[in-house]
Image: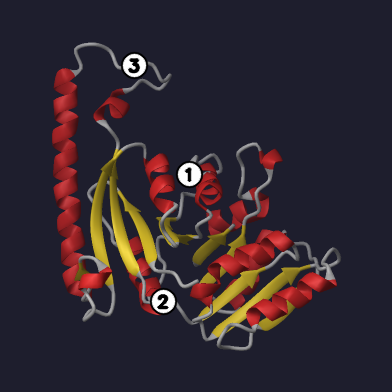
Amino acid sequence: MAFSKILVPLSGQLDGTETLELAIAAARLIRGHVEALYIQPAPVEVLRPADGSEPAGGAQDETVRIEQEAAASLDAAYRVFRNWAVRRGVGLGTPSALHAWDVSASWREYIGAPAQVIAEFGRYSDLIVLQQPGSEVDDPRYVEIGALLLATGCPVLLVPPKARSDFGRNVVVAWDGSRAGLNALTGVLPLIERFPRIVVLTVDTTGTDPMLEADLLRLLTYTSVRPERRVLQPSNLTTGERLLHESRRDGADLLVLGVAAHPQSHGDTLGCTNRHVVQTAEMLVLLGQ
């Protein structure tokens, strides 16, 4: 099934348009529509103490101030979005009304908890584009990304600070030899099949089922190019370090990782290898589940 709707969650005054740029690049590859979803938390949630208790009485003036600041941020963000769309030649509106445009985008606003809102709208999307979280090990957004994958089943494209917006040339697919990895690859195939070069990397295949290897090759016959298959033997580098090293050496502008659902993960759905890659990658990372 081809991708049709690309969701880009936004917030604040929209100081940069990196995620929008990459979403449009993906849309041009797959003739998709970009939906910019601007999310603001409810004032009562902003005022809520860290312990989760109700805000103290007499917070009316503070609520008014927060609402005014939110309205100013929303207005500034929408101006940035419109100016960006005009500059990039992106048609604004629904896809059905914009046949003459190469790609289209629309703007939507919602008030609520960002993680919950993204999960709700993500269920009806084909691709979600997010900014790469910071490098802090305890950044809660890593847990949110894993939860988002499980809640929506939708692939997530993570955009690092200095990502190139002209991606679409060289993709590296990391496959761990598992059935779950094959399922993740199936989910992102509509996007990566448009790349002129596809490299499938596996670090150590001692536990790989030969039948799964055959299924992998059969799946990749649906792409327009002949994929390169590469098996890497273990080294003194961790699996995550090895994947990043090989991806950089290949000049990849996109690295694809599969995320399996592990009930015993205790909230860390991404796993150690994926978390290391997501934290340190300087290229785009596409997570499938």
Tell me whether circle 2 and circle 1 mark residues in contact (CB < 8 Å).
no
- Nearest to N terminus: mark 1 or mark 3: 3
Viewer-side residue, 279 vs 199: 199
* Secondary element type, mark 1: helix
User: N-terminal of the two: label 2 or label 1?
Assistant: 2
Q: Secondary structure at mark 3?
A: loop
The residue tagged with tag 2: helix, strand or loop?
helix
Query: As displayed, is residue 25 above or below residue 42?
Result: below
Residue at horizontal 54 percent and vertical 42 percent from the top = 143
Q: Which mark is residue 30?
A: 2
- Position of residue 52 relative to residue 253, above or below, is above
Q: Nearer the viewer, mark 2 or mark 3?
A: 2
> Is residue 102 left or right of 284 when viewed as pictured?
left
How far apart are labels 1 and 3 at the CA level? 24 Å
Distance from disc 2 to disc 3, alpha carbons, whole Å, reads 46 Å
Residue at the spot of label 1: 141
Which circle marks residue 258 in the picture? Answer: none
Q: Which mark is residue 54?
A: 3
Q: Nearer the viewer, residue 61 or 234?
A: 61
Q: Amino acid at mark 3?
A: Glu
Amino acid of disc 2: Ile
Label 2, label 1: how many angstroms apart (C-alpha)?
28 Å
Asked if residue 112 shows in the view, the reply is: yes
How many dots with numbers? 3
Contact, CB < 8 Å: mark 1 with mark 3?
A: no
- Work out whether mark 2 precedes mark 3 in sequence or the reverse, and give the earlier one: 2
